[in-house]
Image (spheres, rainbow, N blue to C red):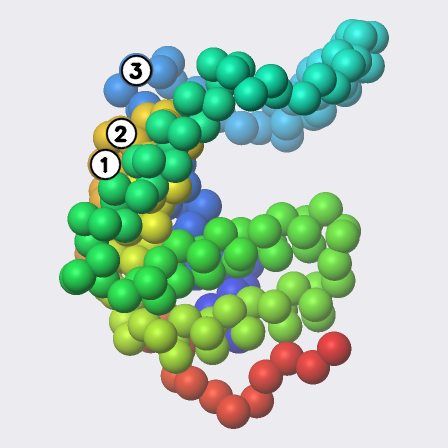
């Protein structure tokens, strides 16, 4: 378990954080080194922003009218998702989205532990169950990566924002995780064998 989900990389969940990076590194300025001082400053700025948001008025909830143009935007998103499914339905079974689902669920479990919403034991148990679900339906890190990229594109198409660049980021990140060099903090999946299916599961 420590190999799969320990602090050294967290393999599935931390790898998914790597895969989920959406910033265009070519277009942004180089970030300063994240020192303890900068981290503390970010905390201060966060508190400042949260306090500022508290001063803003809360808009009153109003239901959408039947002819509201925002419905058309929602409809376009659903249509993109439908077209995606229709295009691939003869080649991939619905379970092929599982890698995406597991990756996002693992990331939520990790964040939940960091925020103190769940205990370490609960987080480990959830990650254990997710790993077992992955090995039941998928067979290797390569297949997991393909599944994650597949689901990620569908999600971005439905969101309607940055799908093309997101696909590129996911593919590059998956390549680094599968084949990158340890000297560049890459290739983590080569360092950890694909988990074996076990009979023992998580018990609450």
Identify the residue at image location x=51%, y=69%: 130
Q: Are marks 2 and 1 in contact (CB under 8 Å)?
A: yes
Residue labelled with disc 1: 168
The location of residue 200, given as percent across then percent down, is 57, 89
Residue labelled with disc 2: 165
Q: CA distance from mark 3 to mark 1?
A: 15 Å
Say whether residue 174 is left or right of residue 199: left
On the rendered image, what quadrant is the C terminus found in? Answer: bottom right
Residue 110 occupies which quadrant of the picture?
bottom right
The location of residue 131, given as percent across then percent down, is 47, 72
Identify the residue at image location x=25%, y=42%: 83
**Dot 2 crowding, Cα within 10 Å, few <14, some 14–19, many 20+:** some
SS for dot 2: helix
Q: Nearer the viewer's eye, disc 3 or disc 1?
A: 1
Identify the residue at image location x=26%, y=29%: 165
Residue 200 appears in the picture as rendered: yes
Q: How many marks?
A: 3
**Dot 1 crowding, Cα within 10 Å, few <14, some 14–19, many 20+:** some
Question: Which badge, 2 or 3, comes first in the chain's sequence?
Answer: 3
Residue labelled with disc 3: 27
Question: Which badge, 3 or 1, comes first in the chain's sequence?
Answer: 3
């Amino acid at each position: 378990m420590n190999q799969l989900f320990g602090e050294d990389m967290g393999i599935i969940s931390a790898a998914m954080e790597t895969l989920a990076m959406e910033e265009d590194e070519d277009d942004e300025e180089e970030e300063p080194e994240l020192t303890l001082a900068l981290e503390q400053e970010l905390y201060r700025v966060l508190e400042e922003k949260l306090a500022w948001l508290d001063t803003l008025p809360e808009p009153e909830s109003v239901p959408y009218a039947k002819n509201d143009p925002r419905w058309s935007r929602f409809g376009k998103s659903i249509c993109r998702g439908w077209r995606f499914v229709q295009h691939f339905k003869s080649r991939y079974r619905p379970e092929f989205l599982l890698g995406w689902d597991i990756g996002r669920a693992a990331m939520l479990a990790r964040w939940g532990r960091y925020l103190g919403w769940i205990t370490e034991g609960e987080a480990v148990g959830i990650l254990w169950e997710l790993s077992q679900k992955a090995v039941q339906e998928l067979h290797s890190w390569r297949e997991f990566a393909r599944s994650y990229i597949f689901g990620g594109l569908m999600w971005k198409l439905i969101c309607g924002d940055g799908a093309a660049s997101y696909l590129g980021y996911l593919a590059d990140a998956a390549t680094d995780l599968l084949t990158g060099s340890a000297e560049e903090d890459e290739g983590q999946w080569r360092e950890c064998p694909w988990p074996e299916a076990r009979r023992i599961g998580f018990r609450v």
